[in-house]
Image (cartoon, helix red, strand yellow):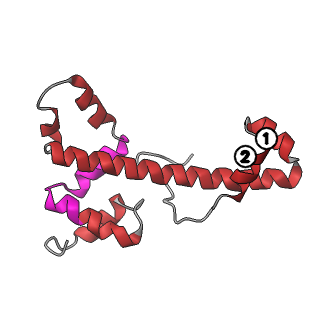
Amino acid sequence: MSRNPGVDAAWDAVLSHRPDETRAAVAERFVDNGISPTDVASVLADMGDGLYAAAAQGDEHWTQRFGGPLAVALLAAEVSALAAHLNSRASAVRARATDGLLDDFSAVTVAARLGVSRQKVYDIARSSTSGPFIEQAPGGSHA
């Protein structure tokens, strides 16, 4: 990344869902393959819908608009990394809410309302609520 002065802030923003210790290596992989922070941001903003639509069309040259097959593989992997991060964040929110429910209701009641077993309620409530997590998903907005 030192080849591109000033790019660190852009990569930090677009890869904010990545842990600090891996972000530079991920950005470097993108840079080495001619993929800009704007390219990654665009794919993450629609959660890979554009990649999927292009792949589903069946055109033999569908990867070219994204920079070729390697670029598509890297971009799709980043969508997956973001989705995993958002899944972990949602699980942390659910754990905190479920733990709060157990302050006011029995595990049996909470289980019935959530549609899970009583044991699962305890598993959910014990889940980790630690981050760090991004505050806003790409393309999302706070109401």
Q: Earlier in the sequence, mark 2 or mark 1?
A: 1
Q: Residues within 10 Å of mark 1 (few under 14, many from 20)?
A: some
The image position of residue 41, as x and y in percent, is 30, 51
The residue sitting at 40% across, 62% down in the picture is 18
Q: Which residue is mark 2?
A: 120
Q: How many marks overall?
A: 2
In this rendering, which labeled residue sits more in front, label 2 or label 1? 2
Residue 30 located within the stretch drawn in magenta? yes
Q: Is residue 55 magenta?
A: no
Magenta part of the chain: 28-47
For mark 1, give the secondary structure. Answer: helix
Q: Is residue 133 above or below residue 41?
A: below
Quarter of the picture holding the C terminus: top right
Q: Nearer the viewer, residue 8 or 52?
A: 52
Give the label on residue 111, or none. 1
User: Which image quadrant: the N terminus?
Assistant: bottom left
Contact flag, marks 2 and 1 (Cβ < 8 Å) = yes
